[in-house]
Image (cartoon, grey):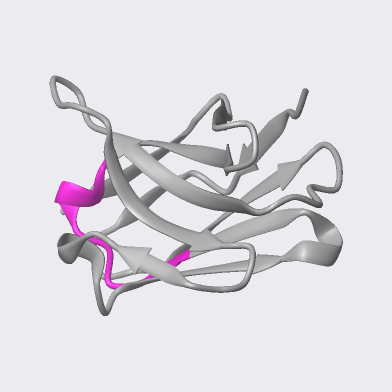
């Protein structure tokens, strides 16, 4: 079992930056992907960005050029640097860990990001 703990959500103004962090409770040695998803009120949860254990990244079109995902495997932590935030980025952001070897997903509790105009 793995617990994911997110931090960094806040209320900010449009155009500013925010960094989210997600720490896993233990070292993940198998092939895995860590990512960030978000869910706005009344909408489906959607992928924001993800990064594999070897550093390959994938971004939603809506955040390309503004958000950067990174990970520190030594700290079992993934980060999401969000720049030029827009009101439409407002959502609960969830950290995800996908472990390929057992095809399992783990989720954090979510952290609220609110961007005011």
Which residue lies at the image location 62% right of the left edge and 71% below the top edge?
A: 54
> Magenta stretch containing residue 84, yes or no?
yes
Residue 55 lies, with reference to residue 30, above or below; the image says below
Tell me the quarter of the picture where residue 83 sits. Answer: bottom left
Which residue lies at the image location 75% right of the left edge and 42% below the top edge?
A: 24
Residue 110 lies, with reference to residue 114, above or below; the image says above
Which residue lies at the image location 78% right of the left edge and 23% below the top edge?
A: 1
Q: Quadrant of the C terminus?
A: bottom left
Residue span colored magenta: 81-90
Report x, y in % for residue 62: 16, 61
Report x, y in % for residue 104: 57, 28
Work out which residue is located at the far bottom of the displayed protein and give it: 65
Front residue of 112/54: it is 54
Report x, y in % for residue 14: 23, 61
- Left or right of 115? Residue 109 is right
- Left or right of 3? Residue 90 is left
Tell me the quarter of the picture where residue 90 sits. Answer: top left
């Amino acid at each position: 079992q793995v617990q994911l703990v997110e931090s960094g959500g806040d209320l900010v103004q449009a155009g500013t930056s925010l960094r989210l962090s997600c720490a896993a409770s233990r070292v993940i040695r198998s092939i895995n992907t860590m990512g960030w998803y978000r869910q706005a009120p009344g909408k489906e949860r959607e992928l924001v960005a993800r990064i594999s254990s070897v550093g390959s990244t994938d971004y939603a079109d809506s955040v390309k050029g503004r958000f950067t995902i990174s990970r520190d495997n030594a700290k079992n932590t993934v980060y999401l640097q969000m720049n030029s935030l827009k009101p439409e980025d407002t959502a609960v952001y969830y950290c995800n860990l996908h472990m390929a070897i057992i095809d399992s997903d783990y989720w954090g509790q979510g952290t609220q990001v609110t961007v005011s105009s």
